[in-house]
Amino acid sequence: MNVISLSAQDLSIAAVLVLALAGFSFRMRLGLGGQILVAAIRTTVQLLLVGLVLRIVFASNEPIWIFLAGSIMILAAGREVMARQSRGLKGWSGFGIGVGSIFLSSVAVLLLTLIAIVQADPWYTPRYAIPLLGMLAGNTMTGIALSMNTLTLAVWQNRVIIEQRLLLGQDRVQAIADLRSEGMRAGMIPSINAMATAGIVSLPGMMTGQILAGSPVLEAVKYQILIMFTITATTGFGILLALRFVAWRLFDERHRLHLEYLAPMK
């Protein structure tokens, strides 16, 4: 089955919908029109550029290019985690926590998937490695951003309660245990909802893409199940790491809360 090619005119029809949405936002003074337009432009430019880059990487099949592409993806994801915080950590702490958590969780699950499950030959085959890393890192980025934002806001809002718990003898883990649970739940909601509604409410992106490209439906289903399981696991482990790192940053070794490490409200 041949893939139906899309022209610039075809894409412009879809772009009209985004422009209409931005127009309604401006008219209703929702404050989202500019963000929608900027995001649409970024999507177009970034995807066109990455398409050109991936053509070169796929053709070369050299590990160094895969490493560079993966590094850029993870660094960009860490930057987005830091930028999406209402009251994040000051300095480069938020960026470091985002990058570190995404790297540790996504790369570990990616290697397991490539070597033990997909068994690509060689295991670093870019046609498998880069798209899988993109899906894992992208979803983990969203989960970590939500969880960190929830935790830091909750710590600020409940600072008096936390300090009272510390005075009563609780350590830093016990003092914010319920707040970390809230952060974990907030970060995991997108992944859990995606698994719970897959096939009923929505056909996930990778499965849809494979079907449109002519792959057997059952093969597309198996790959989508693999992706959803690995995304959920990667996101969960990344969130656990990020929340632990945030707790270490906000408390010292004597279990004292340091609110000065929180940035002002955006």
Image (spheres, grey):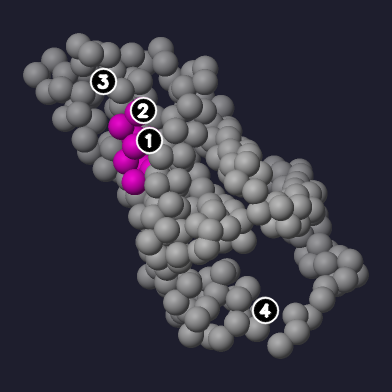
Q: Amino acid at mark 2?
A: Val
User: Marks 4/1: CA distance?
Assistant: 37 Å
Nearer mark to the viewer, of 4 and 1: 4
Considering the whole magenta stretch, tell me its main secondary structure.
helix
User: Marks 1/3: CA distance?
Assistant: 23 Å
Checking the image for residue 246, the label placed there is 2
Q: Residue at x 88, y 71 (%)?
A: 7
**Residue extending farthest left:** 169
Checking the image for residue 242, the label placed there is 1
Residue 80, how many percent across, how many down? 58, 37
- SS class of the residue under badge 2? helix
Nearer mark to the viewer, of 2 and 4: 4
Span of residues in magenta: 237-246
In the drawing, does residue 120 fall left or right of residue 40? left
Q: Amino acid at mark 1?
A: Ala
Q: Earlier in the sequence, mark 2 or mark 4?
A: 4
Q: Earlier in the sequence, mark 4 or mark 1?
A: 4
Q: From the viewer's side, name the closer residue of 193 and 110.
A: 110
User: Marks 2/4: CA distance?
Assistant: 42 Å
Residue 54, how many percent across, how many down? 72, 54
The residue indicated by pointer 4 is 213
Magenta stretch: residue 218 in it?
A: no
Callout 3: 10 Å neighbours few (<14), some, many (20+)? few
In the drawing, does residue 173 fall left or right of residue 5? left
Checking the image for residue 160, the label placed there is 3
